[in-house]
Amino acid sequence: MVSSNMFYRRKRSWRAGDLVSRSTLQLLDFDDGSPPEYAWRRKLSSHANRLKEFNVTFREAIKMHSQFMGILAVIALHSAEILRLSGYMKLGLRLWSYIREEASHGRKAPIDPFTRESDKPSASQGVPLGGMGSGSISRGFRGEFKHWQIIPGSCEMSPVMANQFSIFITRGGNKKYSSVLAPGQHDSLKKSSDDGISSWDWKLRGDRSTYHALFPRAWTVYDGEPDPELKVSCRQISPFIPHNYQESSLPTSVFVYTIVNTGKERAKVSLVMTWAVGFPIIPAVMTANNNPPVTFAVAACENQNVNVTVLPAFGLSGESSVTGREMWGTLSQDGCFDRDNFSAGPSMRSSLGDTVCAAVCASTWVEPHGRCTVVFSLAWSSPKVKFKKGNAYYRRYTKFYGTSPRSAINLVQDALMKYKHWEEEIDKWQSPILHDERFPEWCVLVHDLPVGCCKAVLSSIELCVKYKVTLFNELYFLVAGGTVWIDSASLMADADEMLNSRLSEDNDLPLHHSSRNSAVPLIGFTPHIIDDRENVGKFLYLEGIEYFMWCTYDVHFYASFALLELFPKIELSIQRDFATAVLREDKSRVRFLADGTWGTRKVIGAVAHDLGAHDPWHELNAYNIHDTSRWKDLNPKFVLQVYRDFAATGDMTFGKDVWPAVCTAMEYMEQFDHDDDGMIENDGFPDQTYDAWTVRGVSAYCGCLWLAALQAAAALARSLGHHDYAERCMLKFAKAKPVFEAKLWNGSYFNYDSGTSYNSRSIHADQLAGQWYTASSGLPPLFDEGRIKCTLQKIFDYNVMRVKGGRMGAVNGMHPNGKVDETCMQSREIWTGVTYSLAATMLLHGMDDQAFTTAEGIFIAGWSEEGYGYWFQTPEAWTIDGHYRSLIYMRPLAIWAMQYALSPPRTILEAPKVNTMDRTSYISPSTLQFLQDSVRKMTPKNSCFGSSSSNCEC
């Protein structure tokens, strides 16, 4: 274990009082204006450093290849290394060609490592705005609106600096203060002599202003900036409410300003929200290329204490009738706009090439030592989602607000009326977790302990706080991760249209006829196949903003715990989509870029890698690096997720509906048991989620998943009354398990694979993924408990603690000599989501200290002030020197697997427990005798087999 002193020396920024004076917190402590006790915090003056990306450009790959070929004449290198580098070169060429081909059709390639954003990513992110699936806008911790994702697959990272909150204060007629409520540290701000935003007052230094984030809310406290006698808090609220499938889909947010006047003079305070729409402020893709229009609405709540005025339109240049400079001057002079502006009607519609701005001002008088609340709201409406290959659907929120783009007006009004209810529901959800004293030994009286123990207790409490805060903040991805939530009515219309067109084309052929080249379900394409069984519409989320594939399944395996915990109907809906896909084929030809071969897009029985890119649900498997029908992890992951969801929800209808797909997926895997010993083998290429890391023979990762899937399939079969099938699965399990252990167990962990390469003995951080799901589903452990703990301790000691003292997370591969496995890019990376899942596995096996220390490494490197700046944009991976790969990625949602381990569903807790030795009760006596004879022949002669961890060589 890491020493307590290491924790004690770290900067603490978790108590609000660490950054905001206690007196200010007390003054703001009404109407929820004071930030919460637990939150992620930063000063607005904090430097937003540029993030360091790990990448090899196409030019560098060419250069490396030519240099390498020259070196061959002088130095004799290992032939495998030559082939590997040559293979990367060919892959790069094929990928580059494919990207250009897609671009010629106006489409984005699923993976494009060559195109870079003009606005380099920085450590400036904050809590995003809005609910799920209706387009999102992120807001940086310093107040800038950025990361616009209204159109599926399009992400404009640049901030729109004209979109701001500003404040104007007048005291006694002479004393005036004014400033944009964001530090003016951006390249787009030019000389103050122009007529645009640079002419505004950017006086906020930010050293006395702080940001406090606890998703889906955020607080910004201005402690005497710009007026030393004014305390202001802005509370940002979005309708992300677990188990609420209506309001959680709404594209709207609310900003509640709490104002406290500590001076002796009455103060007139005017808060203004400015909003710009149109190119280049909003990217052209939003109004060009036949994309649906976007309508924005901004409002403020008027009451007896607050007067609201508007400026429907102003421009950012001298050519405008009202310029940004003139708008600012009016507010500085009068503190409000002309009331007659309300009769001017709504803001004008922007055209391509135009920039139109609008402003809403809320003014109030605050008495000496008085308080006041001012509320703004923002909504946007882009009712139709149009994918590049033609299909269009209405978003989920249109079910409640209609399909008119002007529904933004109703949305913004309702947000002002309902935000207090949203906050009540958010508090009901978060409070039990935030105040859960799960570890009573941390709650002892500190003054009764020696000094060293006091430090250790404080460190443990701090560690628990970090976990709880990060648990909520990682959910940002469900809003900012390119999510699309579709109304079921438009899906049904799409299903009817496709059914009619296909029947008219081939009405003399059965719908599952193998001669078809389009994606056709084996069981017939009828509307009920896409019907909304869960009555929540259909939900898509990207693997990451850099990996444009919907619901990537091998990654969803890790992330799905968040949906299962918070929106279980969405999780079941996604599983139904993949169950349908198992029974589908698409015989169109696809070129796989890794080796250049051509193959079938979707094979019957193979679990889809993803639900597609430009025509989701219809054209599956946008991923084309490898032939994923040959991957060994997707089918077991499908079975494991189905059973976990079945066990967690107790939904018998769901189990029955997906049962045919489970059987088909399991039978499909039999082809990968090459020697008929019950255990599947990998085929010497990266045929699993680690798609750059070659696997040969039996592997710890895929083999463990296979064992777990056999047991899960048996458990599901028994629950549904298919006892013969359960017996067959357990027969295979009993046959395969000793093979797995004999080939991979080395006394302290399972080898990476059964091959003969140098990295075959690597310690894989993810080697117990199957056991993780087994324990999460309430099933008997796959291996002896001592052996499981021994393996987890080995991973902790090597993959976690030998990488910068546990301050980075778990590196994927580590040699038994304590050196990082440099076999490939992925073996030397630290995967954030895998680290969280590893920590969850440790929790499930009573290794709490190791679990939280492991997960804390992700916090330190990604979320802490001393880390690399990946907050609210957690990447898939980083290297030990902090270079990232793929920001805003799905897999880190696996932190909710930790919460699932700490608080399992009641159905799991109350399910009858099955002892490991009781597995034989599901097998007939004759079969049992056969198994016992087989196991005796195959049991390895290893003193550690079946013993406790004290005998393990770890």
Image (cartoon, helix red, strand yellow):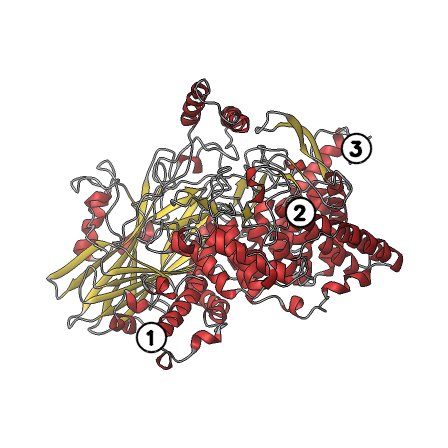
Residue count near mark 3 (Cα–Cα under 10 Å), binned few <14, some 14–19, many ≥20: some
Q: Amino acid at mark 3?
A: His
> Measured from the top left, where is residue 347 in percent x and y?
36, 46
Element under label 3?
A: loop
Residue 945 picture location, percent across and down: 67, 57
Front residue of 13/490: it is: 13
Q: Which mark is residue 703?
A: 2
Between marks 3 and 1 in the image, the one whose residue lies nearer the viewer = 1
Q: Quadrant of residue 880?
A: top left
Residue 170 left/right relative to 160:
left
Residue 456, picture quadrant: bottom left
Give whichever of discs 1 and 2 has the lower sequence position: 1
Cα–Cα gap, marks 1 and 2: 48 Å
Element under disc 1: helix
The amino acid at mark 2 is: Gly
Kindly check if marks 1 and 2 are in contact, taking CB atoms under 8 A apart as contact.
no
Query: Number of marks in the image?
Result: 3
Residue at (69% x, 42% y) in the render: 581
